Every structure is written in structure tokens, then in C-alpha cells.
Amino acid sequence: MTGPLVCVALGIEARALRRGLPSGHDEVIRLGMGPRRAARAAAGLPPDVPLAVTGFAGALDDGLSPGEVLVASEVRYDGQVWPCPSAPLIAGDLVRAGLAVQTGPVVTTRHVVTGGARRRAAREGMRSAAAERTPDRTDGAEKTRTDGAEKTEHADHGEGELARAADMESGPVAAARAGLPFAVVRVVVDTPSRPLLRPATIAHGLAARRVLTRLGPVLARWAAATGTRRVLLGAPTGDMEGDPGTRPTPDLTLLVRPDARPPHPLRSDAHEPGGLHAVGAPEDVALGWLAGARTIRLAGGPPALVSAVLTALEGLGPIVVEKRRASAEAAALPKEAWP
């Protein structure tokens, strides 16, 4: 994919996005405002391409401020939930671009929510902690992961994470794109304590529009990073078992290390083509590293952190995970890769 397919509701959003997209990446589609228009437009979108929904949104709590970016961890709409696994990757690139960013659930409503309706919308589709748990996906010799944006049903409306922002379009688009790379990136324009139709609304809207323009380069990198890939898991060494002629050659090596904050490149040698980076969390994985990287070696730990990186990668497209073993004579990673 050479550029993102970006959907917005309003003309003012489309113009802001186009100004920020790199030259040649101008696929911005106006859905129209509201879930009905979004559903009709989504039915005619090109198939099998990565798609992001962006534009303005209303915050459902005062933990978000006007002009701040919310990258959806999931979209809730009409009794269903669509995960957005690549959210940490997008959020990390936005932070490195100098923007104020948070991640969290986005709920799609049928009308603009104000007052007490914000609190009710925040509770929409809350899932229990048990339903939120993701199994450890670092075991086994080989697995194919194609979760993408596939939907899950609400477990209940009790314990769980409150939605952070509301929009009126993402839900129907998420439903139409289930299983494909999908992202929602919204810029907050109003909050419970700073609602619409106040004197400050114009200033907040102008600030949000400027932020919206700055999303373009990151969305372009996200689209370029999508695609099917292979992950070689669990071999923290420069060499692998197997004949050199058949041994897979990684395009990128990621060493997962909890203390590796911020991310930094490590020395590469003949055993590490494509570069070697230590990361301490999924958001440390730069989207630019992933463009064209169809085989990735993922090493280090702990397992829960490795699994979180895998989950983020699967948001970019199907991945095949292979558990590898190091040969006895394998050369170790550079010494600076380890604490």
C-alpha cells in the first residue's frame, strides 16, 4: 500500500487532512455526518486496503483536553466491539511527532452527546475485565494470527474501561472493515467542562484543525507498514538453527526489554540484516521500521510484553508466528543489547 485511505465526516476535516498528507497520498473520503451516512459510504469503499477514520470527537471525561489526540484501542457501536490492535504503534509515532496523545475506547453514537448523555455514552459497551484478557500468544511452534479488527460481543455493561470519546461514524466503518487493518484517530474539540456552543469553541476548533493537519504523515506511515508478515519468535541470538541456505533472514530485529525506554537502535552486524532495535513497549516500535519488513525477529521478554508487541503487529495485517531455537554455536546479540 502506497498511502492511507482516510475517512472523515466533514469538509473542514478533509481539507485539514489533505494539507498534512505527503505528496501523492490524498485518498481522503467524506463519509457524511452520522452513522447512517457512514454505513452507506462504507459499503462502497475499496476492499482490502488499510483504512483510518479521523476527524473531530467529543471527550467523555475531562482527562482529555481540546486539541489532544485519542487513538482508539477499540470502537464500540450497537452492542459490538471492534478492537484496533495497532493503536499503540500509531500513538507512539504521534508522540514522537510532538503531539499530546492518549489511547482508549471510542464509542459511536447516533447524535451529538452533551451533558448527562456523555456519562451514559462513556458506559456504552463496557466489558468485564475477564473479557478483556488476551491469552499469551508466545507459545507453540507456529500460529497464524488474523485478528485485525474482527468484532467481539460485549460481555456485560458492568466492570470495564469507560469510553473516552464519542464520534458518529467509526462504528459502521469498523463493521464494514472487520478483519482488515483499521484505525481510528480522533482530535478532541470539546469536553464535559468545555462543551460546544461556548465562546472558547471557535478557538478549540481552530486548534483541533491544526492538530488534524499534523496527523497525515503518521497515517501515511501506518498504511505503509500494513501487510502480511512472518515473526520469528524467541531466539535472542544472531543465528538460528537450520541450514544457512534455508534459514529465514529477518528484515528487522526487535529486542523486547522493559528497561529500553526510549527506544534506541543497537549495533548491527552480519547476523542482523535490516537493523536491530531495543523496545520497552509496543508504542516504542516506530512505524517507519515496519515498512517493507515482512520477516521480523522478536526476542527478549517478559512473555506478556512480547505478546503485547505481537498484538500490535497483528493490527497491521495477518502474521505467522514461528517459535525458533538458537543453535549452540550461535553468536550472541551485541553486548549493548542486554542490561
Image: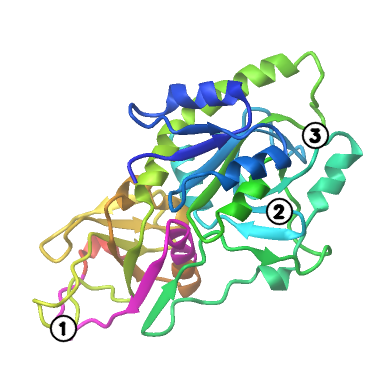
Q: Which residue is mark 2?
A: 76
Q: Residues within 10 Å of mark 1 (few under 14, many from 20)?
A: few
Task: Inspect the image, locate mark 1, and give the three-letter code of the amino acid beneath it.
Answer: Gly
The answer to whether any part of residue 167 appears in the image is: no
Nearer to me, 286 or 179: 179
Q: Quadrant of the C terminus?
A: bottom left
Task: Give the CA separation, mark 2 to mark 1.
Answer: 46 Å
Q: Position of residue 135 (x, y in %)?
A: 56, 76
Is 243 above or below relative to 38? below
Instruction: Give the magenta part as a residue range.
Output: 308-332
Residue extending furthest toward the right: 116
- Residue 112: which disc? 3
Task: Inspect the image, locate mark 3, and give the three-letter code of the amino acid beneath it.
Answer: Val
Task: Inspect the image, locate mark 2, and give the three-letter code of the amino acid beneath it.
Answer: Arg
Residue 44 falls in which quadrant of the image? top right
Is 66 above or below relative to 124? above
Q: Which residue is mark 1?
A: 242
